Amino acid sequence: MRTAKRIPRSLLIGGILLAAGAALAALLRSAPPDGQDVSDPEPPARSAPAETPPPAAEAAPPAEPAPAPSGPVDLERVRLMLDPTQAVVEGDRLVQPLPDGSKAVLSLRPDVQEKLRTLFDKYDVPVGAAVAIEAATGRVVAFVSRSRAPAERPAALDASFPSASVFKLVTTAALIEDGRLDGTARVCYRAASGTRRLSAKDIEEELVEGTEGVACDSLADGVAKSLNPVLARLAYQHLTPRTLLRYAERFAFGRAVPFDLPLDVSPLEIPQDKLEFARTAAGFWHVGLSPTHGAVLAQTIANG
């Protein structure tokens, strides 16, 4: 049996010291200079990847022209552009070119338009209008306005004119339907009265046929001859302001009349005073009328 040699303690300690010295020397050789940070070094910065340039923009295709308007015609827009004075004759029609390149074919007859303009020029009419409507169809065949002075709107659309004796048609309708009269109903009046004015005596006085200065006529004659006392006295005897107002509104006084051009509303006031009411029934004051409304009223009467 072999006996292990015992290592002297001095050699063991010396070996440990040599190993420690070698390790320390190695550490010192790798240490940084004095004052330098000994922390872990930062990893090297990574270079940013090169950006890929955007692809070149492709040329946009040429814009296609806007399609022509289709679908229903915007009648309200067309009405705002209508101006019969700008219409031109194309064959047997009057046509107005519109700003958008389209055309409006008017119902007006060129021959009638020209005839009316010629008459206005011939008699040098200072202010006037003529409107003609086919009774059966409502077609406006003539629409002429004339004014020497500059006007804001055509005279044919202006309702500042007095209705005058045209209003007798409204009164007559009320007398026949509500007053239960017919064309033969007679009334007497002073023959010299009512041409330019109607006094209380002209309307209220009791008169007897055959008396000197007294004339008597029927409702039909009163309308045909525009006899102011006849309509005033019959309205005074058989109608009320409320009744006459109702009939006036039925004939579109005080109300909008549908029309392709901006038409004034014909003003209406039916006085409550009995005497003033009778004067209004005969066509004196309180009621206005545009020439176009007058033509519509005549068409209504013609159609029954």
Image (spheres, grey):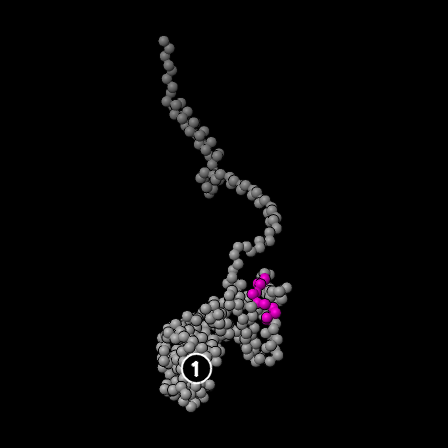
In this orientation, which residue lies closer to the viewer: 248 or 266? Answer: 248
Q: Quadrant of the C terminus?
A: bottom left
Residue at (57% x, 65% y) in the render: 106
Is residue 7 visible to the viewer in this orientation of the structure? yes
Residue 243, given in percent of the width and then of the height, sits at 37, 74
Image-quadrant location for residue 252: bottom left
Residue 18, given in percent of the width and then of the height, sits at 43, 27
Q: How many marks?
A: 1
Q: Amino acid at mark 1?
A: Asp
Q: Relative to residue 208, is residue 71 depicted above or below? A: above
Residue farthest toward the top in the current orientation of the protein: 1
Residue at (37% x, 10% y) in the render: 2
The magenta stretch spans residue 297: no
Image-quadrant location for residue 98: bottom right
Residue 193, given in percent of the width and then of the height, sits at 44, 87
The magenta stretch spans residue 104: yes
Is residue 149 visible to the viewer in this orientation of the structure? no
Crowd tier of the residue under label 1, counting other residues whose Cα lies within 10 Å: few below 14, some 14–19, many 20 or above:
some
Q: Which range of residues does the magenta coloring cover?
A: 103-113
Q: Quadrant of the N terminus?
A: top left
Q: Relative to residue 244, is residue 34 depicted above or below? A: above
Q: Which residue is mark 1?
A: 217
Image-quadrant location for residue 179: bottom left
In this orientation, which residue lies closer to the viewer: 125 or 214? Answer: 214
Q: Relative to residue 198, is residue 117 depicted above or below? A: above
In this orientation, which residue lies closer to the viewer: 206 or 174? Answer: 206
Residue at (51% x, 39% y) in the render: 44
Residue farthest toward the right in the current orientation of the protein: 91
Residue at (51% x, 41% y) in the render: 45
Residue 133, given in percent of the width and then of the height, sits at 53, 69
Determine the secondary structure under disc 1: strand
